[in-house]
Amino acid sequence: IVSNSGDPAAFVALRDAQEIQFLKANEAIRNDRARLAGLVRETPALQGIPMQAVSGISQDTRLANAILVRLEPWADPQEVAAAIEQWNHYRALTTAEQEEVLAKSVIDRARQQILLFRIILLAVSTVVIGLIIYTMTMEKTRDIATLKIIGAPDWRIAGLILQQAVSLGLLGYGLGAVLINLTYEHFPRRVAIWTFDQIVLLGIVLVICILASGLGIRRALGVDPTTAMSGAA
């Protein structure tokens, strides 16, 4: 079982959970005993308390971080929360408020971080693919000029550049899909791969390739046909 952040989680009994969380180290227990014993000696009203009771307080693990309250259908959550908050050191949250706190502190923050990472990754991928297509177009300047001399229309030349970009993107997507499907079970955190997400990613890859091919198409359409006869690249 994993938590909402992907970390391993386990279900244990309440008593075991209290022992795991609240059991102090030996040094902390010894310091607490000495501190409480000093308070007992310095406070006249506590002189009759036996030291065994003081020692038990310092290592008591029957504590709780939160208390869940289940209300009757007729009860008003806001009124009950207001009544609880009148006590010292208590903070009452309704179910709606707790869901809002959890959504803002955990879900929304992680979602924003992942969204920012995705935007940066998509921008970098677009630039990299665009530079690759532009470089490949530069290397084929003479071939493109030859196509123009024999009468090839601009849309056909642009289509060839676009096909090259899409083929490059599909090749990378295919390799990535095979790699992630073979290795996702070995990740330290849980990775859920859904078919819908893969389809959306494929669409994003195609859009990136189409946008990135713009540099190569612009370069190809600007090639002078006489370049083929001069031999210059």
Image (cartoon, grey):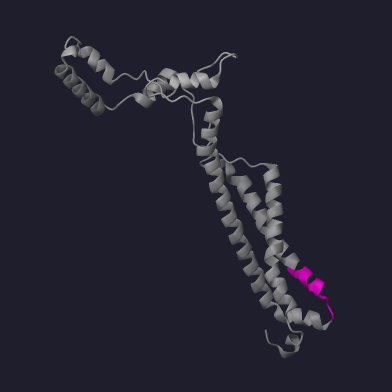
Q: Position of residue 163 (x, y in %)?
A: 75, 65
Would you say residue 56 sits in the magenta stretch? no
Of the pair 108 and 19, the residue shown nearer to us: 108
Depth check, front residue: 217 or 165:
217
Farthest residue to the top: give it. Answer: 48
Please determine whether, in this image, residue 99 is positioned above or below residue 53: below
Observer-nearest of 111 and 147: 111
Residue lying at 58% horizontally and 45% vertically, measured from the top left: 183
Residue 233: quadrant of the picture: bottom right
> Is 8 left, or right, of 46 in this rendering?
right
User: Which residue of the protein is positioned furthest toward the right in this rendering?
Assistant: 151
Q: Is residue 154 magenta?
A: yes
At which x and y percent is residue 98? 52, 29
Q: Can residue 208 be seen in this view?
A: yes
Q: Is residue 187 visible?
A: no
Hey, which quadrant is residue 181 in on the image?
top right
Work out whether 62 lies above or below 185. above
Name the spot of residue 114 as percent of width and height, x first: 56, 47
Magenta stretch mostly in which secondary structure? helix
In the displayed structure, 21 sits above or below 185; it is above
Q: Residue 30, position in %: x, y?
A: 21, 24
Give the residue drawn at x 75%, y 77%.
221
Q: Going 83% across and 77% down the picture, which residue do you hit?
A: 152
Q: In this view, does 181 lie above or below 20?
A: below
Q: What stretch is highlighted in magenta?
A: 151-161
